[in-house]
Every structure is written in C-alpha cells, then in structure tokens.
Image: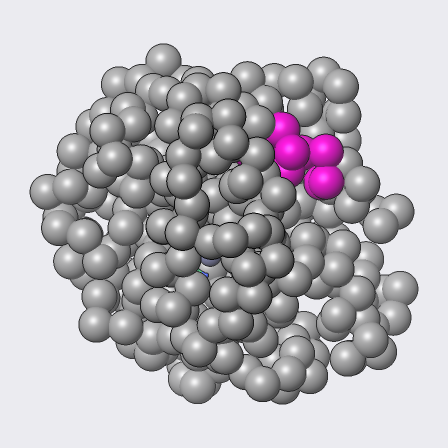
Amino acid sequence: MNRPFCELHLHIEGTLEPATIFQLARQQRLTLPYADEDDLARRYRFTDLQSFLDLYYDNMRVLRSEDDFFALAWAYFLRAGIAGIAHVELFVDPQAHSVRGVAETTVLRGLRRAMDRAREELAISSSIIACVLRDQPVDSAHAMLEAVLSADVAVTGLGLDSAEAGHPPSRFAAVFADARAAGLHVVAHAGEEGPADYVWEALDVLGAERIDHGIHALDDSALVQRLVADRIPLTVCPLSNVRLRVVEDVAELPIRRMLDDGLCVTINSDDPAYFGGYLDDNLRSIQDAFGLTDGDLDKLCENSIAASFLPDSEKARLR
Ligand code: ADE
Ligand code: ZN
C-alpha cells in the first residue's frame, strides 16, 4: 500500500495469532485446550458473530501481564508497518480482562509501550478506544469507564462492541453521556448483525461520531441520507463480514453503492488474526471484487484520514 491509510476498526485482541497464543501459553506454563496451532486454526470456521466471540474471549486467557499486552500490540504494529499503515485507532475490551483479574492499567500500559515504540521505530501513530461489552451489565460498563478515565494512560474514545443482536445501544446511554462529558470521542458497532434501528440509536442516543460496520444501515434510505448529511463515517471490514457470514462473498457488500451514495466509507480489518487478513489483504479483496480504480483507492485513503480523530495538523501531514 503506497498510500497513508488509517486503520480505524481494529480490535487489538483480534490480532492474537495462533503462534502467539502458543508462545504466551508456553511462557506461562498454561495448558491450552488445543493440540497445536493447526488444531486451533481449524476452529476458525465461524457460523456467526457469537461463534467467533466465544473463541476470541477464550483465547484471551494467555494475556495476563503488561508484557503480554506489549507483545500482542508490538506484533500487530510490525505487521501494520508491512501493510504501510500510517495511523491506527485501536479498540481494546478492558472488561474481558478485568473479569479475569487483569487490571485496566496493566492492559493500557502494555499497549502504550508498544504504541510509543511504533511511533519511534515505525513512524506509525496510534490511539486507544476502550470498548463497552454490550452483552454485559451496564454497571460493569460504568466501572470500566471510571477505571479507564483514572488510569495513567490516556484513551481517545469509548466504543461499543461484542454480541449485537438483542443488545441495543440505548442500554448504555448514561455511560456514553459520561464519556462525552469527559471529552472522549464516541463510536459504536451497529448494523453488523443488528438492524438499522441500532444505527439510529447509536447516533441519536449515544452520540456516535463513527459507525463500526453499519452494513445494515443501507436497508434504510432515510438513515443513509442522515449519514451522508452529517458526514458520519462507516468503518467497513470486508473479510470479517464474509467470515462471520454477514455476506457469502465480498462482492455482495454494498461498497460500490456506499461510494456512489457519497457515504464516508473506510476499509478496516476488525480481527485480522481470525478473519484471514490485515488491512492490505482487506483492500486487495475488494479491489479484485469491485475493480476499484486508483481514484477509488485515493478516496478510501482520504476517507480514512478524514474519519480519524487525528488533529487537523496531523491530517494535513498525511495528505
Ligand atoms: N469484538 C471483536 N470483534 C467484534 C466484531 N466484529 N463485532 C462485535 N464485537 C467484536
Ligand atoms: Zn469490530
């Protein structure tokens, strides 16, 4: 990729490769419920979002110390450097770690060390978006936000992820109001498996500035008009949508329509270790499927810069 793409939808725990899982388990003398890396990799055939999330959360057992989170993020940054990524706004799921006794500060400090090194050695800038697990109690989300805001590592935003169906954004209205009052940016997964109504709620109730996925927003033309009018970006993840059976093939994704309708569509990798590819692989997959021109790729790159939470001076530097 010879363009300065920003990656805006990347779960850092979703970059945990089978080799790293086994390496960390060996270091910690942990016995895994898989015979070897191939046995684990064979389980990466998902039927829906929940079938993926079950394995995703289970594999996090190998992430315990600050060094483990550093190793996880540094391995991602090395791969992001190969992909030519200029800036990353990475998601992390603090509740998935605090439930195992791993403090928010342990997680954030490990990530921060890798982020500092990536800026110095790879010229990749980055920031952190802590995500609320929408299938967990509201109290747990409040506690996570409080812990993150009082940690000695700054986060840029609050996101909403995990199992979408049956978990509307409005449950977390108060948590997101607190985050906005604290000066955080707000984003939300919506319209991945859930309906267009959840996208409306993410916008109107949570105040989301970007919608993660948003594929089902295209089922509602008034919603599309709203997203265009308010320049609300969508962070689309093509290989994820195929692996989680949102669509059978990338060619079924409404990416051409999104571009033609004037939506600020961006391309991202979601959980690349699980879905068969990093940002460059995702871009290649849609380039082939949609016959994207250089102009389309320029547009997708520009959208990723415009949709980022970088200050204007940094955006100008990337353009
Ligand atoms: N957590 C990690 N990946 C996710 C996805 N694709 N959707 C919702 N929550 C997630
Ligand atoms: Zn995601």
Q: Is residue 63 above or below residue 164?
A: above
Please identify the residue farthest to the top as the structure is shown.
152
- Verify whether residue 74 appears in magenta: yes
Q: How is this picture coloured?
A: one colour
The answer to whether 136 appears left or right of 211 in the picture is left
- Of residues 178 and 77, the one drawn nearer to the viewer in this rendering: 77
- Of residues 85 and 281, the one drawn nearer to the viewer in this rendering: 281
- Span of residues in magenta: 72-80
Q: In this view, does 204 lie above or below 8?
A: below
What percent of the width, then of the height, locates residue 212? Answer: 46, 59
Q: Which residue is drawn at 66% across and 18% down?
A: 117
Q: Quadrant of the C terminus?
A: top right
Q: Which residue is drawn at 15% across and 41% down?
A: 140
What percent of the width, then of the height, locates residue 69? Answer: 48, 28
- Of residues 65 and 41, the one drawn nearer to the viewer in this rendering: 41
- Of residues 99 and 208, the one drawn nearer to the viewer in this rendering: 99
What percent of the width, then of the height, locates residue 13? Answer: 47, 43
Residue 222 falls in image quadrant: bottom left
Please identify the residue farthest to the front as the structure is shown.
35
Q: Residue at x 59, y 51 (%)?
A: 37
Residue 47 falls in image quadrant: bottom left
SS assignment for the magenta stretch, majority: helix
Q: Is residue 209 above or below residue 193?
A: above
- Verify whether residue 122 appears in magenta: no
The answer to whether 261 appears left or right of 299 in the picture is left
Q: In this view, does 201 lie above or below 7?
A: below
What percent of the width, then of the height, locates residue 219? Answer: 44, 86
Q: Is residue 314 visible?
A: no
Q: Residue at x 35, y 60 (%)?
A: 54
The answer to whether 250 appears left or right of 186 in the picture is right
Residue 146 falls in image quadrant: top left
